[in-house]
Amino acid sequence: MASNYMNSFFTLLLLATSLFAVASFEFQVGGVKGWVVPPVNDTKIYNDWASENRFTAGDTIRFRYKKDSVMEVTEEEYKRCNSTQPSFFSNTGNTVFQLGRSGTFYFISGAYGHCERGQRMIVKVMAEDESSSSSHSEKSSAVMAPISSLGFLKFVSASMALSILF
């Protein structure tokens, strides 16, 4: 009797943590090419990529690059392709930025001349009421992944738990 109670408890606990784990996704900016200066004939590549995806608060975006940087800036700094005091700066080559709120985020390359050549992006994060009507499953699968391998394991565990319960 106690064993059945404990199994049910752990199954429900696993299910509850699984639902939280799949609520956030990580997106690879620019897909396999990463964060690079776009070709001359495709300077809107990053804004096109961002508009094709559905971002919600809690998602992360990963910038992969070489000999470059990424900055989060204001709308005015984005338009000018210049910032002396970005709200976020990284030049590690593998930058993860969490989209912690709904609203608009502006990113530019910090390398001289790259922003002017199209290496900049506007990300619009949906408000909670917008995202509740559409699920993460509608996102482009080519650019999203669970936020961590642990999140993936939790997702798999939830599926297993559901199959045990039903």
Image (cartoon, rainbow, N blue to C red):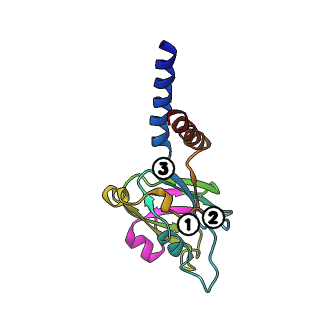
The residue at which mark 2 appears reads as 68
Quadrant of residue 76 in the image? bottom left
The residue at which mark 1 appears reads as 110
The local crowd at label 3, few if under 14, some if 14 to 19, many if 20 or more residues have their Cα within 10 Å, is: many
Q: Nearer the viewer, residue 27 or 41?
A: 27
What amino acid type should be assigned to the residue bearing mark 3? Ser
The local crowd at label 2, few if under 14, some if 14 to 19, many if 20 or more residues have their Cα within 10 Å, is: some
* Secondary-structure class at tag 3: loop
Q: Given the current orientation, which residue lies at the most extreme left position?
A: 129
Q: Position of residue 130 (x, y in %)?
A: 34, 61
Between the C-alphas of marks 1 and 2, the distance is 7 Å
Report the side of 104 relative to 63 (left or right): left
Q: Are marks 3 and 2 in contact (CB under 8 Å)?
A: no
Q: Position of residue 131 (x, y in %)?
A: 37, 58
Which contiguous range is marked in magenta? 68-89
| Disc nearest the viewer among 3 and 2 | 3
Q: Position of residue 88 (x, y in %)?
A: 47, 56
Q: Nearer the viewer, residue 12 or 40?
A: 12
The residue at which mark 3 appears reads as 24
Q: Nearer the viewer, residue 152 or 32?
A: 152
Between the C-alphas of marks 3 and 2, the distance is 27 Å
Q: Position of residue 27 (x, y in %)?
A: 55, 58
Q: Name above or below for residue 22 compared with residue 128.
A: above
Q: Are marks 1 and 2 in contact (CB under 8 Å)?
A: yes
Q: Given the current orientation, which residue lies at the most extreme front position?
A: 166
Mark 3 and mark 2 lie on one chain; the one further toward the N terminus is: 3
Q: Image point 50% across, 58% down: which residue? A: 137
Between the C-alphas of marks 1 and 3, the distance is 27 Å
Mark 1 and mark 2 lie on one chain; the one further toward the N terminus is: 2
Q: Are marks 1 and 3 in contact (CB under 8 Å)?
A: no
* Secondary-structure class at tag 2: loop
